[in-house]
Image: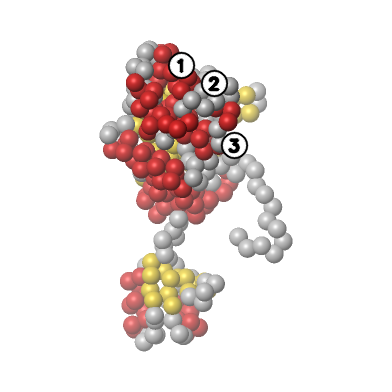
Amino acid sequence: MIEVTDLTKRYGNNTAVDGLSFRVRPGLVTGFLGPNGAGKSTTMRMMLGLDRPTAGEVRIDGAPYRQLRDPLRTVGALLDAGAVHPGRTALNHLRYLARSNRIPARRVHEVIELAGLAGAARRRMGTFSLGMTQRLGIAAALIGDPAVVMLDEPVNGLDPEGVLWIRRFLRDLASEGRTVLISSHLMSETALTVDHLIVIGRGRLLADTGMTAFIDQHTEAGVRVRTPEPQRLRDVLACAGIEVTECADGSLSAAAVPERIGELVAAHAVPVHEVTRSHASLEEAFMRLTADAVEYRAEQPEGSQR
């Protein structure tokens, strides 16, 4: 388990992380989300002993990272896949990591195969593509067969096959009882991978909950209705106090549950061709929750639609 307690980091007058507390539990893939500047990278660096907190602490398997005897055997992490010596081969890079943590040499070849890099093991890392570099970073994180895995933007640069591979692999790790924490800005991929969410904004905890509960809490229930008499249906729903908006395809979106819509169209004999529950997205829920915590916001081009 990763335990973060009252974690704070200040840089002069700027507070990057502000009294943050949460737990990352084994057996789940936990997503660590937040807008740019929210403090995610700073928090992960403090988890790994790369930055010292101003206050608070992080314990992994009951101890600070700096006190772990063989850290790669306990925690596997990927923060910056490009932070490698370009003149060193992938094989020698992993050999060095293994030797420094008393990991058997055979494990090097296992993670090379696991990451799909067998054909590039003797190539210098400076010749690697972004996707190959990312695969090597994941291999390095897994070399100690750790109980805790922390990955920042794990699908960065991966092709579709690689994205599918890492998604399945992370879920397999969690199913083995490991603690898996991933940070990402890709909401669609996160929604397919993650069980639990920790969301921060401006260095503070905004949410610590399951994926489904998070979406339900921060989005509105809705129903998509298609009818040959849209104006009549709008009038019926409006009289019942139900907010209705028109979609681009001519269907109507109603802020209600399907059962209520069904009762109203039956009572007023309104013909309908479709009544479908709208599925809110993680992206929608995230944007609503973090709207006031966005540090950098681009201007919308004139005439564009949100």
Kind of residue sitting beneath label 3: Gly
Between label 2 and label 3, give the one nearer the viewer: 2
Question: How far apart, in angstroms, are the residues tagged by discs 2 and 3?
Answer: 33 Å
Q: Label 1: which residue?
A: 96
Q: Is residue 109 above or below residue 237?
A: above
Question: In the rendered view of the protein, which quadrant contains the C terminus?
Answer: bottom right
Q: Residues within 10 Å of mark 1 (few under 14, many from 20)?
A: some
Find numbered disc 3 in the image and state the secondary structure of the residue it sits on: loop
Between label 1 and label 3, give the one nearer the viewer: 1
> Is the Cβ of the residue at disc 1 closer than 8 Å to that at disc 3?
no
> Is the Cβ of the residue at disc 1 closer than 8 Å to that at disc 2?
yes
Q: Residues within 10 Å of mark 2 (few under 14, many from 20)?
A: some
Residue 60 in view here = no
Question: In the rendered view of the protein, which quadrant contains the N terminus?
Answer: top left
| Residue at 54 percent of width and 72 percent of height | 248
Q: Depth check: give the residue in front, 280 or 135.
A: 135
Number of dots carrying numbers: 3
Q: Label 3: which residue?
A: 37
| Residue 88: mark | 2
| Residue at 70 percent of width and 58 percent of height | 301
Find numbered disc 1 in the image and state the secondary structure of the residue it sits on: helix
Kind of residue sitting beneath label 1: Tyr
* Nearest to N terminus: mark 1 or mark 3: 3
Q: Residue furthest right?
A: 302
Q: Quadrant of residue 275?
A: bottom left
Find numbered disc 2 in the image and state the secondary structure of the residue it sits on: loop
